[in-house]
Image (cartoon, rainbow, N blue to C red):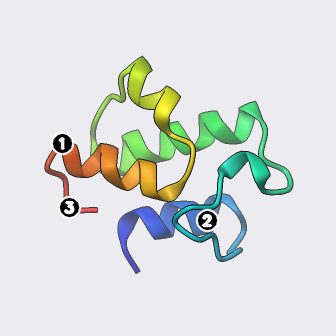
Amino acid sequence: MSKLDQIVSELFEDEVIGDEVLFVDRAGFDSLKHVELIVAIEGRFAIDLTAEEIGRLTCKRAAREILQARRLDV
């Protein structure tokens, strides 16, 4: 399992989330979960996301693209 998949799995309590599924469409996803996602990504990849990147963080595909643009092993 990739690092990103592991983060999303933990955040959504092992629910399988497809790459294109919008986080906001998942039950229980709110502003607190969004912050938890940001903190988890920043911690796991030892980065600070920009405001623009945080705004684009809408699904796994977008998260993967953000991380790959930084040349990180997702």
Residue type at tag 3: Asp
Q: Compared with residue 54, is residue 64 higher up or lower down, i.e. above or below? A: below
* Residue pointed to by mark 3: 73
Q: Residue at the location (42% across, 49% down)? A: 63
Q: The C terminus lies in which quarter of the figure? A: bottom left
* Residue pointed to by mark 2: 10
- Looking at the rendered structure, which numbered label has been put on residue 70? 1
Counting residues from the start of the chain, the first of labels 2 and 1 encountered is: 2
- Spatial CA distance of label 2 from label 1 is 23 Å
Left or right, 31 with reference to 3? right
**Label 3's element?**
loop
Counting residues from the start of the chain, the first of labels 2 and 3 encountered is: 2
Pointers 1 and 3 in contact (C-beta within 8 Å): no
Q: Residue at the location (52% across, 66% down)? A: 19
Residue type at tag 2: Glu
User: Which residue occupies the extreme front position in the image?
Assistant: 20
**Label 1's element?**
loop
Q: Residue at the location (50% across, 39% down)? A: 57
